[in-house]
Amino acid sequence: DDTALVIRIRAAQRPPARAKRAPIDIAFALDRSGSMAGRDKIELVKDAVVAVTHHLSAEDRVALVVFDNVVDVLHELSEATDFGKRRLEHVLEGVMARGGTNLSGGWLTACQQLASTPESMAAPRLQRSLLLTDGLANQGITAPDELMTHALELRRRGIDTTTIGVGLHFDEFLLGGMAEAGGGAFQYIADTSELFAF
């Protein structure tokens, strides 16, 4: 008698390989104005900066700009090594809420940190500014349309803008519009666990 032998071979399923992303440069623009003092908003955005930074690798780079009516670069764009992350967390500890809100000055200074990337390095890298604020701009450029125009121009130069609103009274139209024009995302957070992946 003829006997038919059927052998089925099924390959073990492997999880899909995680695509290696391009290195990313992130410049935080953190609002430290007086309006950020309520409901621990300043501590929330500081925690958010740390949470995002923990996802960076040594191939990435990070900068930190803080603003009220005065704009300060606390951490110039540099590699996100373990030492660099600890240094950034250290300077964050001293950030306190005070003064007015020159949102445009802080955000554009953060974007300047990204624009300083040498052309030879910029091509294969992602560049993103992250604006963390309650969105109550009262100094510098305050017109939403003008800020959105700047965000669009920066996007065309390869610098995206993501905005993160905190508190209950931020300007959703302003922050949402800047993110849309800037090719990034807009998010409201009440807790760092609500942060999406950047």
Image (spheres, rainbow, N blue to C red):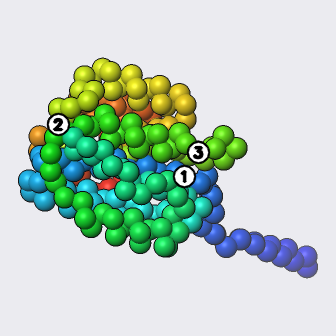
User: What is the quadrant of residue 21 in the picture?
Assistant: bottom right
Q: Secondary structure at mark 2?
A: loop
Residue 150 visible to the viewer: yes
Please report contact status of discs 3 and 2: CB closer than 8 Å, yes or no. Answer: no
For disc 2, the marked residue is 136
Tell me the tag on residue 137: none
Mark 1 residue crowding within 10 angstroms, few (<14) / some (14–19) / many (20+): many
Mark found first going from the N terminus, 3 or 1? 1
C-alpha span from label 3 to label 2: 30 Å
Q: Is residue 157 above or below residue 61?
A: above
* Dot placed on the residue nearer the N-terminal end, 3 or 2: 3
Cα gap from disc 3 to disc 1, whole angstroms: 12 Å
Dot 1 amino acid type: Ile
Measuring 44% from the left and 26% from the top, which residue is drawn there?
152
Checking the image for residue 24, the label placed there is: 1
Across and down, in percent, residue 48 comes to: 30, 59
